[in-house]
Amino acid sequence: MDYDEVREVDPEVADALTGERDRQEETLAMIASENHVSEAVLEAQGSVLTNKYAEGYPGARYYAGCEYADEVETLAVERATELWGADHVNVQPHSGTQANQAVYYAMLDPGDRILSLDLNHGGHLSHGHPANFTGQIYDVEQYEVDPETGRIDYEGLREMAEAFDPDIVVSGYSAYPRAVDWEEIQAAADAADAYHLADIAHITGLVAAGVHPSPVGVADFVTGSTHKTIRAGRGGIVMCDAEYADDIDKAVFPGGQGGPLMHNIAGKAVGFKEALEPEFETYAQAVVDNARTLGDTLADHGLELVSGGTDTHLVLVDLRESHPDLTGGDAEDALAAAGVVLNANTVPAETRSPFNPSGIRAGTAGLTTRGFDETAIEEVGDLIYRVVDDVDSEDVIYEVGERVVELCEEFPLYAR
Ligand code: DSN
């Protein structure tokens, strides 16, 4: 992975690519939405399919020469169907947000009502945030997690649905560490005779492996991204009941997108094949076990975990109790200086700005891909705490950084 061809043409970009390769190799990727795909997925994504336009769907394209594009997309769809068990799958969305956009576009009219979790409580921009098109086109009301437990208050959600009468209830979250009870969300949607969109962007891999309950067969629509815990090519996916298949396909293309990114779809197909191997279930279980170990380690040091722990791939730390003067942004910066890359995150009942909130979010999908076991993760938890507890100490950052480099060498990423 030396990017020699790029270097011939464009040394500046080649430097950036090798810099990024080395950065990933030499730091701990703990942003909960990130992972490391295999070299096979990288190769498929970097393939000649980037040259091909293939508007339409397999067997019904608007351009000639789509026979291999058809093969690849059909394989991606078949494998996704096997992984998640949905009646219908569309693998063309360019991202998780565009997968959500397709569902809204297919099923809602401007002004229709969305009931979704507040971003500060773990929701997502594309679930109705005022800065997103969803917050501007639709009438949005947002639920929050229970302030005591940090968990979804399903009964409160049902009551909100009855009062607000939404057209769609959105579940699935980007900073919610607990398992979601899809049937409870469905009950809220049913109470308002609303659709239910479950956005499993973060937990696609955990659901596929059966280590988190599946919303497929419960919610009307299930969307996701394909490069997080599922570790396939970058992009989005929509799954739905057969009755909505045509509406969804038309909403993806031509409703919201033009030509599909066929090279990404090739990466999705390859990653899905890898995820169908029995080892993937072992991997997904290890991701969750590692997240629990990380959470326990941080909690043992006195850090407060939102909801008290995790059932998924991520932990969310509320720094206000243990370190009232420390912002998530300052913690993120100090950790990044030590080679631990995670993100500052809002926490429920946030009292600071979203630009420099009170929490940090950490995921274990990337480290687990590198082979980090629970002993190594426990040490990572200790290292994170050392930095968080002493963000101004250059000595601590230096010492932790040294150990991070050793850990990265012990658990290498890509063969060079
Ligand atoms: N950016 C992703 C995340 O970090 O959760 C979601 O789109």
Image (tube, rainbow, N blue to C red):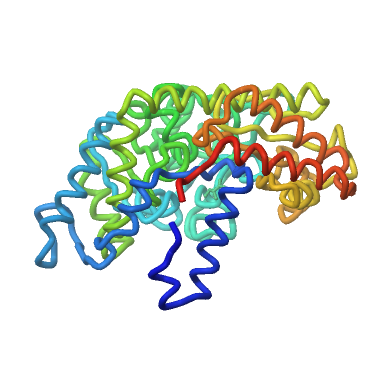
> In which quadrant will I find the N terminus?
bottom left
Count of all numbered marks drawn on residues in the image: 0
Q: Is residue 274 left or right of residue 326?
A: left
Residue 155 seen anywhere in this rendered image of the structure: no
Q: Is residue 70 left or right of residue 254?
A: left
Work out whether residue 64 or residue 68 is closer to the camera in this orientation and state it. Answer: 68
For the question of whether residue 364 can be seen, the reply is yes
Q: Residue at x 34, y 23 (%)?
A: 278
Please state the horizontal and vertical placement of residue 85, each as a whole percent of the image: 27, 29
Q: Is residue 135 left or right of residue 227?
A: right
Q: Nearer the viewer, residue 33 or 275?
A: 275
Is 220 displayed left or right of 10 in the figure?
left
Q: Place residue 237 in its image quadrant.
A: top left
Residue 251 position, x and y percent, is 29, 55
Which residue sits at x=51%, y=47%?
Answer: 127
How far across and down, in percent of the image, does residue 353 sit? Answer: 76, 53
Q: In percent of the image, x 35 and y 38: which residue is there?
A: 221
Image coordinates for residue 41, horizontal then vertical, percent: 35, 47
Establish if 103 lies above or below 286. below
| Residue at x 54% of width, y 44% of height | 33
Residue lying at the far bottom of the rendered structure:
9
Decide: is 263 above or below 314: below
Quick one: 361 or 247, which is closer to the camera?
361
Tell me if residue 380 comes above or below residue 22 in the rendering: above
